[in-house]
Image (cartoon, grey):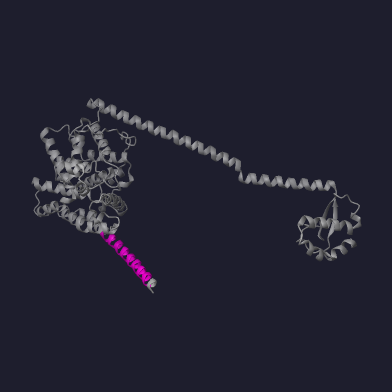
């Protein structure tokens, strides 16, 4: 090995040169030098594999970064026989195979892919089968409902001249929606969360209210006719952001809760209770989502037909009694002509009272009567019923904040939809409906302070029990919106100061 050590003494020079060369060239030069410098290696075959080992016997990688070969830690060169080489290659292949198997077991990529594909296919099939079952059940329920009504009324025609009633797939026969005792009790309170219920469940709740108030048995209503009427009512509420079937349910549930809370069945006749509930159900039928002001300014067909006098409310009344004119939907069929005339007049009076243009007139009339109110006076009772339906129609802020606030968003959306159309048609735009001028706090503060609280406080003179459950929530809602307005004002002031400072900075 002396020759090898002599060769390696020039290692630093050789490495300096080699670091400037490509690795393959450098390695070939090392092999040439080894053969020339170590005579013992010159007898080996040219294709013999050599292992370069350090002083510890570890294999040294031949590359520009290999450690220095010194007398203390000199390299040794060992030729490998064919058998040794084969053993090492076999060992290397075994290691690679084991690594591949470990990765395969760890990740199981192919198996995982197959399993995911199978599970997705299984879920899709299950969803498809469940959907088919629901559709079949709905079809079966609707078919059974129609057969029952046909057998009882000797007619299955739900048509009028302009609109066909076809119970939708999401409104099947709903006896299967049994209300829990908890729901039955919650329905009797203003805190009821009207957002938690699907269409079928709301229909079941409405049916329950009529039964609970003894209107069905008391007036010998046909239960199938009640169902048909409610289905038709649902189909005649349009899909508006605010004035929709859920609003109808919301108003009717609030009327039901006021009847329970104020013990109105002890004061009013059952016919009055029937009028109150039915007017609440029908009060916004076929509302187009654009208010009376738009109807009049745009000279719509409704405004022309009703001579600009409460065109929407008159239309709601007309649609309600078009529905009642269908035998399958006439819940008043057991009343004689005189009684039906009284009910019809009562419902029309209450629905027309929901026109906010008449708010001041109706409230002033009630204020003049409330201090000397006479429940035996028909005029007094009619005025009270008008105020009650008005309270229910605009009662959202009486409910808990999480129930009330989404209604504000819905109403503003409908307002903005109207004001955008008014701008496009060059019609006057009310500031409280203009998306560029109104905010949620500004929209609600004035309405709560000057409309809701005065009206409910006047009703409280007759029914003190509403103070805690209805008026107190109104006061809390007013205070909360006033706090929000202060925050909005402060933020606008900060933004204004920033803009002014930027402007002054640019001028300098």
**Residue 456 is one of the magenta-drawn residues:** no
Q: Nearer the viewer, residue 476 or 466?
A: 476
**Main secondary structure of the magenta stretch:** helix
Q: Quadrant of residue 159?
A: top left
Q: Nearer the viewer, residue 216 or 393?
A: 393
Q: Quadrant of the N terminus?
A: bottom right
**Residue visible at 26% across and 50% down?**
422
Residue 223's spot in the image, x, y percent?
Answer: 24, 33
**Residue visible at 46% across and 35% down?**
126
Q: Quadrant of the C terminus?
A: bottom left
In the image, is 379 to the left or to the right of 59? Answer: left
| Mark count | 0
**Residue 496 is one of the magenta-drawn residues:** yes
Residue 119's spot in the image, x, y percent?
Answer: 52, 38
Residue 58 seen in this snapshot? no
**Residue visible at 20% across and 53% down?**
466
Q: Quadrant of residue 73?
A: bottom right
Q: Nearer the viewer, residue 470 or 506?
A: 506
Q: Nearer the viewer, residue 303 or 187?
A: 303
State whether residue 366 is above or below residue 154: below
Q: Which residues are magenta?
A: 478-504
State whether residue 189 is above or below residue 38: above
Residue 132 seen in this snapshot? yes
**Residue visible at 85% across and 52% down?**
79
Residue 446's spot in the image, x, y percent?
Answer: 23, 58
State whether residue 388 is above or below residue 132: below
Residue 174's spot in the image, x, y percent?
Answer: 31, 35
State whether residue 316 is above or below residue 403: above
């Amino acid at each position: 090995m002396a020759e090898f050590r002599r060769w390696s003494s020039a290692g630093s020079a050789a490495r300096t040169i080699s670091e400037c060369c490509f690795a393959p060239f450098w390695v070939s030069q090392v092999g040439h030098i080894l053969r020339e410098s170590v005579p013992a290696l010159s007898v080996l075959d040219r294709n013999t594999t050599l292992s370069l080992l350090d002083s510890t016997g570890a294999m040294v990688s031949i590359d520009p970064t290999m450690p220095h070969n010194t007398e203390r830690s000199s390299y040794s060169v060992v030729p490998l026989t064919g058998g040794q080489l084969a053993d090492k290659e076999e060992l290397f292949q075994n290691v690679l195979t084991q690594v591949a198997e470990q990765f395969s077991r760890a990740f199981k990529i192919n198996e995982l892919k197959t399993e995911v594909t199978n599970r997705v296919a299984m879920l899709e099939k299950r969803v498809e089968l469940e959907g088919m079952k629901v559709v079949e059940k709905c079809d079966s329920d609707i078919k059974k409902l129609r057969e029952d009504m046909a057998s009882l009324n000797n007619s299955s025609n739900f048509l009028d001249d302009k609109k066909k009633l076809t119970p939708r797939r999401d409104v099947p026969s709903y006896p299967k929606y049994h209300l829990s005792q908890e729901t039955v009790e919650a329905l009797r309170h203003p805190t009821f969360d009207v957002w938690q219920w699907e269409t079928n469940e709301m229909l079941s709740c409405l049916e329950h209210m009529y039964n609970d108030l003894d209107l069905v048995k008391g007036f010998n209503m046909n239960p199938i006719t009640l169902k048909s009427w409610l289905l038709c009512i649902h189909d005649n509420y349009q899909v508006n952001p605010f004035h929709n079937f859920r609003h109808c349910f919301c108003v009717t549930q609030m009327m039901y809760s006021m009847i329970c809370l104020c013990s109105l069945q002890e004061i009013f006749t059952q016919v009055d209770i029937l009028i109150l509930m039915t007017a609440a159900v029908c009060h916004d039928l076929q509302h187009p989502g654009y208010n009376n002001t738009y109807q009049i300014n745009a000279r719509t067909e409704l405004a022309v037909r009703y001579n600009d006098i409460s065109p929407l409310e008159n239309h709601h009344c007309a649609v309600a009694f078009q529905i009642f004119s269908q035998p399958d939907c006439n819940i008043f069929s057991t009343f004689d002509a005189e009684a039906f005339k009284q009910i019809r007049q009562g419902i029309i009076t209450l629905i027309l009272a929901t026109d906010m243009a008449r708010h001041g007139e109706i409230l002033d009339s009630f204020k003049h009567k409330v201090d000397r109110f006479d429940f035996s006076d028909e005029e007094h009772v009619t005025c009270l019923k008008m105020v009650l339906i008005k309270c229910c129609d605009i009662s959202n802020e009486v409910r808990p904040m999480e129930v009330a606030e989404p209604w504000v968003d819905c109403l503003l959306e409908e307002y903005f939809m109207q004001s955008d159309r008014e701008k496009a048609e060059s019609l006057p735009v009310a500031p409280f409906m203009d998306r560029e001028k109104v905010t949620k706090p500004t929209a609600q503060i004035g309405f709560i302070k000057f409309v809701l609280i005065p009206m409910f406080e006047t009703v409280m003179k007759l029914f003190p029990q509403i103070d805690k459950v209805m008026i107190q929530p109104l006061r809390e809602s007013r205070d909360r919106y006033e706090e929000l307005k202060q925050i909005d004002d402060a933020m606008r002031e900060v933004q204004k100061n920033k803009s002014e400072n930027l402007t002054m900075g640019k001028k300098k």
